[in-house]
Image (tube, rainbow, N blue to C red):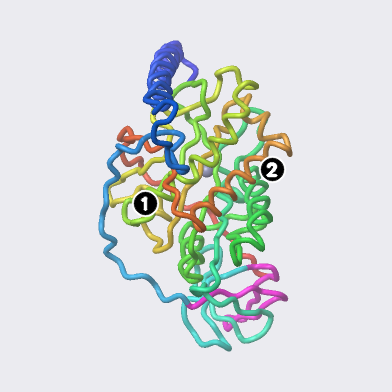
Amino acid sequence: MSTLFGMRVLRTLEAALVVAMAFALAACTGGSAGVGGPRPPISSPLYGGGDVVWPVRARTTPAPPAFGAVVTDAPAPLTNGRALQAGLTLPIVGGTPDSPEVMTPCARIVRLLGSGFTTIAAATRAEKIVVVDAGHGGIDHGATAPDGTRESLRNLQVAELVRDDLQGSVGRVVMTRTTDRVTQLRFRTALADALNASFAISIHFNASPDGYSTHPGTTTFGSVEDPNGRRAAGVLFEAERSYLDTLSPILHGRWASYADSGALYRLGSRGDFYFQLRESHVTWVINEAMFISNEPESRLLARADVRAGLASAIATGVKRYLGSDVSGSGWRTPIPRGDPKAAADPPCSDPYV
Ligand SMILES: [Zn+2]
């Protein structure tokens, strides 16, 4: 926002946020049981919101078969005469074990001829899979920092750190992209579904805040069609806020924020607004830890130690979600934001040799 009117809206929102957050703080710190009283449970929510009603909707589509995925370990020839580059992880959607049909990052279905790949089995009860999804990529670069740094770069940097942290402690970890390339949402969703992943997280950084706050504007989105959506959003929110709160003294109350930042659901005309939340049968969280469009926050994100700290917090949240019954916290009733016109899919070139 750059108009005078915009500035006035920002200041009003800022005041409202500070007042609202002062109340939230009072609610969280009040009501102590006193010496000798009952001790609070260890999982006592840090950020409140336990009274927020999370809508529950039935998923109407059946889950696709979990055929697993392939990793191209060399140029992989296709039945159409072309070959896919090495280093891709692609969901299997049909075909045979020797000649599977896979979905490409541009969401096209192609068939492998039989060489240049190895197969990854879908998750089993004994071995979990976590999908780490770096948002955007290529010409679809997402938001932009004031110095021109693209959100897609920061997403990938943090996603790689999350992967490294999780590897070895939660079973297998699969990335939806490891390079700066356009990757369709349908592909990201199909990969998580084909692997029957236990959890998937889509890492983003935000833009277009409603105003400023003394607290981080961390927002995590969970699904209303997934019985685990509320808890997943709350556990990730709590883990990230616990870390980002330690950086507040640097920001001097200039965190960008939504008026309703928190662990949220977001509805569109067809149910969950976000594609992965609406279309996948895996528990996803769409993760917006910070606002990259806010100059002080973009400077924090340029620091390797902050990216490492945030990635560690995200990984802690994933491990807590998968390995315990903690509830999380920080749910807010979302401000209805309508159903903006869907952006056209960006031009997408598949990674052929
Ligand atoms: Zn984004």
Q: Position of residue 276 (x, y in %)?
A: 43, 55
Q: Is residue 151 left or right of residue 36?
A: right
Q: Position of residue 94 (x, y in %)?
A: 47, 81
| Depth check, front residue: 312 or 45 | 45
* As drawn, 1 above or below 91: above
| Depth check, front residue: 110 or 161 | 161
Any magenta on residue 199?
Answer: no
Residue under label 2: 308
What residue is drawn where x is 55% and y is 60%? 131
Label 2's element? helix
Mark 1 and mark 2: Cα distance apart in space: 27 Å
Query: Majority secondary structure of the magenta segment?
Result: loop
Q: Is residue 124 left or right of residue 353?
A: left
Neighbor class of circle 1 (other Cα within 10 Å; few <14, some 14-19, many 20+) is: many
Marks 1 and 2, the one that precedes in the sequence: 1
Any magenta on residue 73?
Answer: yes
Quarter of the C terminus within the rendering: bottom right
What residue is drawn where x is 48% and y is 63%? 198
Residue under label 1: 223
The reply to whether discs 1 and 2 touch (Cβ–Cβ < 8 Å) is no
Three-letter amino acid code of the residue under disc 2: Ala
